[in-house]
Amino acid sequence: MELDSISLARQVDFVFRQLEGELTNATAGTVLIQIRNNAVGKFGLKHHPIETKNGKFETSSQGLTGSQVQAFRQMAMDALKFRKEWTHGEILYDFSVRSNANSWSASVLYESNYNMSNWNTRYIPKQNGIWDS
């Protein structure tokens, strides 16, 4: 099956399934997904924070549970409904586990990217150097 024929929601589902092991027990971080032509090109997870006190690593609190990871994956797919009319860019899902470890929060950031080199054939320059469509 070609990637072009798979919906972006299914691709995001795939990304979160691939990252499930890293997300489980993670206390905070950012899942990043780069998109080109409505297809996931690159994805990953930025873990943060790794804290030290007096030069020694702190024992981190409990991170995301398996069920919280599943809820996070569903939230990520549902959030795609807010993405409108762009095919190139990044999606960043920031998450953190609250101190009581029973709750977590996440935010979604969409960044659309455009490349002018793809548009240069649509415009023909005038003699005086001003672009015209």
Image (spheres, helix red, strand yellow):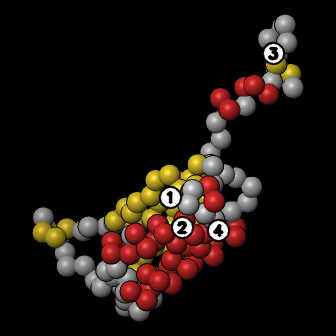
Tell us which disc is closer to us: 1 or 2.
2
Q: CA distance from mark 3 to mark 1?
A: 37 Å
Identified by mark 4, the residue type is Leu
Q: Residues within 10 Å of mark 3 (few under 14, many from 20)?
A: few
Residue situated in front as seen by the camera: 7 or 79: 7
Q: Is disc 3 placed on a helix, strand or loop?
A: strand
Residue situated in front as seen by the camera: 85 or 93: 85
Tag 4–tag 2 contact (CB < 8 Å): yes
Q: Residues within 10 Å of mark 1 (few under 14, many from 20)?
A: many
Quadrant into which the N terminus falls: bottom right
Q: Earlier in the sequence, mark 1 or mark 2?
A: 2
Provide the residue designation for mark 3.
Answer: 125
Provide the residue designation for mark 2.
Answer: 12
Tag 1–tag 2 contact (CB < 8 Å): yes
Q: Earlier in the sequence, mark 4 or mark 2?
A: 2
Q: CA distance from mark 4 to mark 2?
A: 9 Å
